[in-house]
Amino acid sequence: MLDGVEAVVLDVDGTLVHRAGDEVHVQPGACEVLAQIRASGRRLAIFTNGSHDSPAWFAAGLRAAGLDIADEEMLTPLRSVQAYLRMRRLDGPVLAFATEPARRFLEEEGVLLAADDGPVDAVFVAHADVVDFPLLERAARAIIAGARLLTASYAPAYAGADGPILSRGAMTTAALAKASSTRPVIVGKPSQAAMRTVEEQVGARGGQLAVIGDDLTMDVALGRLGGARTILVASGISGRLALDAIPERRRPDAVVGGVAELLDWL
């Protein structure tokens, strides 16, 4: 299954870990899989659609839970939104629905954030702890006037140890899309911007990658978008599915019960 694969892209929640409140539980075999990927000489990227803090913050949290992940291996929509802005040559002010740590990271990376009463070229919805109606109205009017509506993720939920965790970003994006009659552009998984970010990080093209995750609509869709090999992990939100029960256009190359089953392929 992984012959000829030069780099592996792994999801986080539902694949490497499960979250229960503030607790992070490492999935069986996850540590061994990371070690074996490196031992095989393959490059590694970890991509989560989490966007409430910097990629380095996510990497540090996973290390604290016991997973050997370097800061530079960690990818999130806060990185891929930059790829989208570069690809579209958008360098004007961005109105961001984001936490303060996420806003600081974007500014440090050179993203121009919109002033309180200034112009807006794009609206980017990450994770926000608080959303008020004046900000929603300002963003919707900017979108109606021509600003791009970008979102880290439009998936309604992601896998938690006690069931699906609802996405505040998706809720906020849905409100803006409805108010402005605009279809949002996803810049996290799955998107061309996310695939470009992965390719730049690992130095390999999509066809040389294996994308592994628990969500058909995000992880498998990302891999198929780039022509990568795709493996669905049944320990997360999609659950155990038979390959022939999945429509061909969405079908992964393989389904495993958990990441520990990947050890035989590495």
Image (cartoon, rainbow, N blue to C red):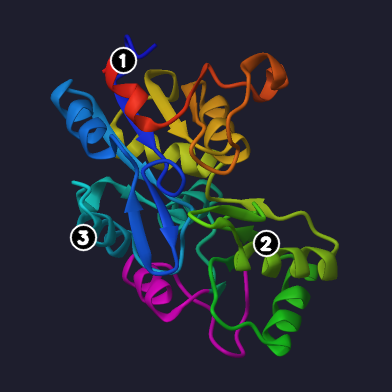
Residue at (43%, 75%) from the top-left corner?
103
- Please indicate whether residue 161 sits to the left or right of residue 203 in the image: right
The residue pinned by badge 3 equals 64
Q: Is residue 123 something one can see in this rendering?
A: no
For the residues labelled 3 and 2, the Cα–Cα distance comes to 35 Å
- The reply to whether callout 2 and callout 1 are in contact (CB within 8 Å) is no
Of mark 2 and mark 1, the one earlier in the sequence is 2
Q: Is residue 235 something one can see in this rendering?
A: yes
The residue pinned by badge 1 equals 265
- The reply to whether callout 3 and callout 2 are in contact (CB within 8 Å) is no
Horizontal and vertical percent position of residue 74: 31, 50
For the residues labelled 2 and 1, the Cα–Cα distance comes to 40 Å
- Magenta stretch containing residue 118, yes or no? yes
Eyeballing the image, is 53 above or below 157?
Answer: below
Q: Secondary structure at mark 3?
A: helix
**Label 3 CA crowd tier, 10 Å (few <14, some 14–19, many 20+):** few
